[in-house]
Image (cartoon, rainbow, N blue to C red):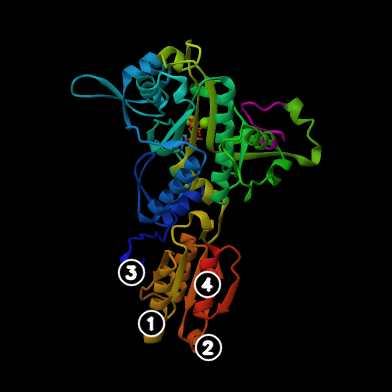
Amino acid sequence: MRLSRYFLPVLKETPAEAQIASHRLMLRAGMIKQASAGIYSWLPLGFRVLKKIEQIVHEEQIRAGHIPMLMPTIQPADLWQESGRYNAYGPEMLRIRDRHDRDMLYGPTNEEMITDIFRTHVSSYKDLPLTLYHIQWKFRDEIRPRFGVMRGREFYMKDGYNFDLDYDSAIHAYNRHMVSYLRTYERMGLQAIPMRADSGPIGGEDTHEFLVLAETGESEVFYDSAITDLKLGSRDVDFDDRDACAEIVREWTTPYARTDETHDPHRFAEVPEERRRTSRGIEVGQIFYFGTKYSEPMGAMVNTADGQRVPVHMGSHGIGVSRLLGAIIEASHDEAGIIWPEGVTPFHCGIVNLKQGDGEADGACAKLYQALCDRGLDPLYDDRAERAGAKFATMDLIGLPWRLTVGPRGLKNGVVELTSRRTGESEELSPEAAIDRVAQIY
Ligand code: ATP
Ligand code: MG
Ligand code: MG
Ligand code: MG
C-alpha cells in the first residue's frame, strides 16, 4: 500500500476522552472512530489488524478440529425463554421488537441458538464429538462501556460450542480449547495466563479465564510467577490425543493463578513468597464446561450405542477478538506509539522515502516495494511529500515492527537502513539483503 493512496486519518492531538494508552493510540493512529458509546467503526488500519487476529483465531480453531460456521446477530427471544435465560440475562441484553410484535434480541452469546441447531440435526452418538464455532458481532448493553474496543457494547467474539457424549469426552474438548487458546495468544505475541474463574451467567462447573497482565486491566489477579515461564513454543500438539492435551492443561493449571472472584488466600500463602504476585489483568478469553445445563431444558438428546436417550454434554469457549487489539497494545507500546508483534501487524514493514521527488530515491523505493510484494509481504510505503520527521512519527505511531529508510545519501553507498520499532536499533544493508532479512523475519 502506498500511503498517499491510503486512508490513515492520524490525529495530532491526544483525544481527551481516552483514559488508557490503547484507546488513545487506536484513536490517534486512525484505527477506529466511535459511532456512539461502545460502538465503533473500524477504519482501514484497525480493520486490517482485526482481520489478522481473526485469521489466527480461525487457523488455530481449525487446527484443533473445530468447525467454522456463522450464526446471525439477531435471535428470536423464544429460544432464550426455553433455556430460562431470557429474563435472567437482565439489562445487558438488547431487546428488539419487530413489526409483527415478535420479541427478538441482538445476541450477547449463542448457547441457545447452537443448541437449537444441534437438536434439529443430530440425534445419534455416532455424530459425536462435535465442536462448532463462529466469529460474529455480539451486543451487550454494558453499563459502563469504556476503554475503546476493550469494553464495547458491540464487539467481535469467537464463540465455540462442544457437544460430547459423556463427561470424559467433554473434558477433552475443554482441554483441547485451553491448548488451542494458548497457541492462539502466543501467535499474537501475547502472554495470556489461564486462571480459575467464576462462571457467571453462562453457568457451569469448570471454567478458566485467560488474562493478559496489564496495569489497566479490570480484574485483580493473583498468581505464582512460575506460570509466566511456561511457553508452548514450537511444541507439536496432537489435538486428538486426550493424554497429551490433559498433560499440557495440567502443566498450565498447576501453578496458582486465580482472579479475585475465586482467589483463595490460604492456598496462595502456600506459594513461595518470592514467587507470589498480585497484579491486574485483561480478560481476553474464557472456556466453560457446563454439562447438560442447556441440553436438558432444550431437549438436545442423543441415542447411545445401547439405545438410551441422553442429554449431550456441552461447553462454550469465547475469545474477545476485538478486545484483543486493545490488550495487545496495552502490552506492547511506548511513548511514541504502538509496537505490533509480527504476528498481527497491519503491514509487515514500512518504507520511508527521505527525499520524495528525488528520482533515485523514488526509484529505489518503488523497487523495494515491488520486491517485498513479490515475496508475499505487505509493505506500507510512505510516499508523501512530507518531512522525514513527520514520516518517522507516523510510522512509530502506527507501530509497524520494521522500517526501511531510503535516502540519497545511503543510496550513494548502496545501502538502505533497516530499523526495529521495538529496540530502535538500525542496520545498514544493501536493498537486496534488506529484503531477504525482512522476508526471513516473517
Ligand atoms: P467481562 O468480564 O470483561 O465483562 P465476560 O466474562 O462477560 O467479559 P464472556 O462472556 O466470557 O465475557 O465472553 C468471552 C470474551 O469476550 C471475554 O473473555 C472478552 O474477551 C470478550 N468480551 C466480553 N465482553 C466484552 C465487551 N463488552 N467488549 C469487548 N469484548 C468483550
Ligand atoms: Mg461481561
Ligand atoms: Mg468476565
Ligand atoms: Mg468471561
Q: Amino acid at mark 3?
A: Ser
Q: CA distance from mark 3 to mark 1?
A: 16 Å
Magenta stretch bounds: 251-264
Q: Marks 2 and 3: which is nearer the front?
A: 2
Residue 65 visible? The answer is yes
Q: Marks 3 and 1: which is nearer the front?
A: 1
Q: Position of residue 17 (x, y in %)?
A: 43, 47
Task: Name the residue that disc number 1 marks.
Answer: 363
Task: Name the residue that disc number 4 marks.
Answer: 436
Do callouts 3 and 4 mark residues in contact (Cβ within 8 Å)? no
Of the two numbered discs 2 and 3 on the same chain, state the one appearing first in sequence. Answer: 3
User: Where 249 sits versus 56, above or below?
Assistant: above
Q: CA distance from mark 4 to mark 1?
A: 19 Å
For label 4, the crowd category at 10 Å Cα-Cα, with few meaning under 14, some 14 to 19 and many 20 or more, is some
Of the two numbered discs 4 and 1 on the same chain, state the one appearing first in sequence. Answer: 1
Which residue is pictured at 36% across the width and 76% down the height?
385
Q: CA distance from mark 2 to mark 4?
A: 19 Å
Do callouts 2 and 1 mark residues in contact (Cβ within 8 Å)? no
Q: Position of residue 296 (x, y in %)?
A: 45, 13
Q: CA distance from mark 2 to mark 1?
A: 16 Å
The count of marks equals 4
Which residue in the rendered view is the most extreme toward the left? 99
The disc at residue 4 is 3
Q: Is residue 263 magenta?
A: yes
Label 2 CB less than 8 angstroms from ligand 1: no
Do callouts 2 and 4 mark residues in contact (Cβ within 8 Å)? no
Q: CA distance from mark 2 to mark 3?
A: 28 Å
Residue 150 visible? The answer is no
Label 2 sits on a secondary structure element that is: loop
Which residue in the rendered view is the most extreme toward the top? 308
From the viewer's perspective, is 24 left or right of 7?
Answer: right
Task: Name the residue that disc number 2 marks.
Answer: 413
